[in-house]
Amino acid sequence: MRLFAAIAVPEDVADGLARRQSGLPGAKWRPREALHITLRFFGEATPRQADDLDAELSSIHRAPFELNLEGVGAFGDGHTERAVWAGVAPSEALEALHRKCETAARRAGLAAETRAYRPHVTLAYLKRPDPKRVAAWITGHNLLRSPPFRVDRFGLYSSWLSLNGSTYELEREYLL
């Protein structure tokens, strides 16, 4: 089972993002229900690890906080660009929650994350994109700024791969 912890994007913010999901030929735009800010991707987990992870995530206590999205970008470079995303404005509260999820993963016996944490909302996956079109899309949407939204919960999601991309299912929700 592939698992990750994430904050769901509120419906009004998702509506604003959906209006930007066009103008890139071949992009696989993510549906509204899949828009989220990953706190920690855990990867494959056994049922026992999933239970231990759930127990650890349940013990996280943080105060609710506000976030807003700001700017857009792409992962990869040139013809290797693989996704476009909306950025998240810097937030110490978000960073602290991410660190708590990392600690929960280690306590559940999962490997430590080796990549730097870059909070974002994936808007589309790309396959062999035209770098000029990606650059133009980024330029056209780089002033993105969502209204602040309250984060008072996060979830443990399972990820299922299919021919149409990944689908996500909320397994557990944790209140802050």
Image (cartoon, rainbow, N blue to C red):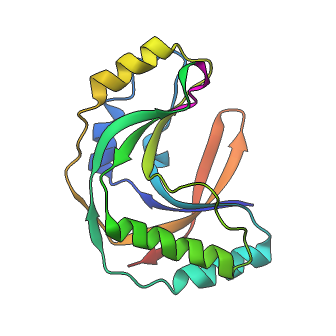
Q: Which of 112 and 54 is in front in this view?
A: 112
Left-right relation of 155 to 16: right
Q: In which quarter of the image is the C terminus?
A: bottom left
Left-right relation of 13 to 62: left
Q: Which of 91 and 162 is in front in this view?
A: 91
Q: Does the magenta stretch include residue 69?
A: no
- Residue at image position (61%, 46%) is 167
Q: Quadrant of the N terminus?
A: bottom right
Left-right relation of 129 to 67: right
Against 8, residue 35 (above or below) is above
User: Which span is picked out in magenta?
Assistant: 79-83
Give the number of marks: 0
Q: Nearer the viewer, residue 51 or 137?
A: 137
Q: Quadrant of residue 40?
A: bottom right
Against 9, residue 174 (above or below) is below
- Residue at image position (23%, 42%) is 145
Can you see residue 173? no
Can you see residue 102? yes
Left-right relation of 18 to 111: left
Give coordinates of residue 111: x percent, y percent: 72, 68
- Residue at image position (59%, 52%) is 168
Give coordinates of residue 2: x percent, y percent: 71, 58
Give coordinates of residue 8: x percent, y percent: 42, 57
- Residue at image position (60%, 78%) is 104
Q: Quadrant of residue 45?
A: bottom right
